[in-house]
Every structure is written in C-alpha cells, then in structure tokens.
C-alpha cells in the first residue's frame, strides 16, 4: 500500500474519531482523563522500578518521591475523573493562552512569508485559552472533548494536505 493511500486511510480514521469526540465531548473528555491517569500510574511505577539503578541515597529518595507523586496523581485522577476533568480544563486553558502568546511573538518576529499565518494561529489559540479560563469551571464538562475532537479534525486535514515525499523540497 503506498503512502498516499495510507495517509488517506489515517485521515478518514482521524475524521471519524474527531466526529465522535465532538458529538460525545463528555465521553471523550472522560476517556482522555482516565488515559492520563493510566499514563501517570505507569510513569510512577517506572520511576519506582528504576530505584535499583540509583547509586546514592539522595537519588533513591528523589526517585521514590517522584514515583509516589505520579502514582498519587494517577489515583486522584482515576478515583474521581470528573473533578480531574475540571482541573485539566483550567490547565488546558492556561496552556493554550500561553501557547497563543508565544505563537504571536514568534509570528511577529518572523520574516517568513508564513509569519501572518503564525500570528493568526496565535490569536485563535490565545482566544481559545482565554475563553476556557474565563468560562472555567462551567465549560469543563464539554470543553476537553470538543477541543480534542477539533485537534483530531485539524490533524486529519493536515495529513491530507501534506505533500508526498517526492514533492518535498
């Protein structure tokens, strides 16, 4: 199967996932939150398993604290994913706001012909972040799932427009 067909299949799958995430934002946000809890738990266990490789007591103490922090966060997320979604929504809003400001600065400083597009991306990203922060916590139930769906949709579009390797300069 050639790469164009693979990209198109991947794009269709991303469009389907995006549609599901946008139509069912609460379910997709909850699944994302639970997945984050699982990843945090795995990271904590990984940190604890690395204790044997630490040479000194200080390294073992910090590695243990790191592992226990990951596991504690994972348990908090997995025990109450709805409250975790509320916290993650505020975090996502602040993150998007900061990213938008950085994109604005990067686009303004760029002499590239795509600098205007980077500024536009920065404005939109900052507005999304600001809206999440201003409307928090009332938007927490649907925002993460909807944003995730929008990100999947944009990834699918980007996948369709990516030039073939032979077309890359």
Image (spheres, helix red, strand yellow):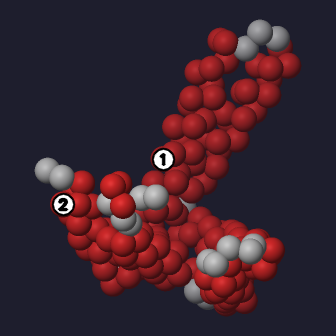
The mark closer to the camera, 1 or 2, is 2
What's the residue at 56%, 31% (across, down)? 45
Residue 65 visible in the picture: yes
Mark 2 is surrounded, within 10 Å at the Cα level, by few (under 14), some (14 to 19) or many (20 or more) other residues, namely few
Mark 1 lies on residue:
38
Disc ID at residue 5:
2
Quick one: SS at disc 2?
helix
Residue 100 visible in the picture: no
Of 42 and 4, the residue lying toward us: 4
Of 61 and 113, the residue lying toward us: 113
Residue 3 location (% of width, % of height): 24, 54
Disc ID at residue 122:
none
What's the residue at 54%, 41% (across, down)? 41
Residue 107 location (% of width, % of height): 73, 76
Residue 59 location (% of width, % of height): 80, 20
What's the residue at 23%, 70% (across, down)? 12
């Amino acid at each position: 199967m050639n790469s164009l067909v693979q990209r198109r299949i991947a794009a269709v799958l991303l469009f389907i996932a995006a549609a599901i995430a946008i139509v069912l934002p609460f379910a997709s946000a909850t699944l994302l939150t639970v997945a984050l809890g699982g990843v945090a738990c795995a990271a904590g266990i990984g940190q604890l398993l690395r204790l044997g490789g630490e040479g000194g007591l200080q390294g073992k103490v910090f590695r243990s604290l790191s592992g226990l922090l990951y596991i504690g966060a994972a348990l908090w997320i997995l025990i109450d994913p709805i409250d975790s979604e509320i916290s993650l929504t505020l975090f996502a809003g602040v993150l998007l706001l900061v990213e938008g400001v950085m994109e604005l600065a990067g686009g303004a400083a760029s002499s590239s012909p795509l600098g205007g597009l980077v500024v536009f991306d920065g404005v939109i990203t900052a507005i999304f972040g600001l809206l999440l922060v201003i409307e928090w916590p009332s938007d927490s139930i649907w925002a993460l799932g909807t944003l995730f769906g929008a990100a999947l949709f944009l990834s699918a579009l980007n996948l369709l427009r990516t030039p073939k390797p032979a077309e890359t300069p």
